[in-house]
Amino acid sequence: MGNHLSEGRGAQDPVGRPDGEQVPPSPAPVVPHLPDVMSVAR
């Protein structure tokens, strides 16, 4: 359980490397997605 959290939170960890890579690109698309969802909901 602790390892799983460390993977997503520990971007510097070698095991969390793939997880950390998805973290930066996640917020980028999330920003345009937030307004997109709001526009669609409107």
Image: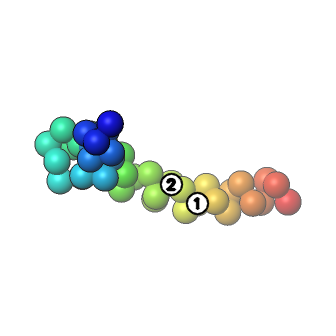
Locate residue 27 relative to residue 15 in the image: left or right.
Answer: right
Residue pushed farthest front? 1
Say which of 9 and 36 sits in front. 9
- 6 versus 38 height, above or below: above
Please provide percent x and percent y for residue 21: 29, 47
Please provide percent x and percent y for residue 14: 14, 42
Q: How many marks?
A: 2
Locate residue 15 relative to residue 30 in the image: left or right.
Answer: left
Please provide percent x and percent y for residue 18: 27, 39
- 41 versus 7 height, above or below: below
* Residue type, numbered disc 1: Pro
Measure the alpha-carbon separation of dots 2 and 1: 6 Å
Locate residue 39 relative to residue 19 in the image: left or right.
Answer: right
Q: Which mark is residue 32?
A: 1
Instruction: Tell me, yes or no, if residue 41 can be seen here.
Output: yes
Instruction: Assess disc 2: are there few (<14), some (14-19) or many (≥20) residues with their C-alpha within 10 Å of its C-alpha.
Output: few
Q: Are marks 2 and 1 in contact (CB under 8 Å)?
A: yes
Residue 36 image-quadrant placement:
bottom right
Residue 19 image-quadrant placement:
top left
* Residue type, numbered disc 2: Pro
Instruction: Tell me, yes or no, if residue 20 can be seen here.
Output: no
Q: Secondary structure at mark 2?
A: helix
Locate residue 17 relative to residue 40 in the image: left or right.
Answer: left
Q: Which mark is residue 29?
A: 2
Instruction: Assess disc 1: are there few (<14), some (14-19) or many (≥20) residues with their C-alpha within 10 Å of its C-alpha.
Output: few
Q: Which mark is residue 6?
A: none
What residue is shown at x 28% (from left), y 42% (from top)? Answer: 2
What residue is shown at x 32% (from left), y 36% (from top)? Answer: 1
Residue pushed farthest left? 14
What residue is shown at x 61% (from left), y 55% (from top)? Answer: 33
- 41 versus 3 height, above or below: below
Residue 38 image-quadrant placement:
bottom right
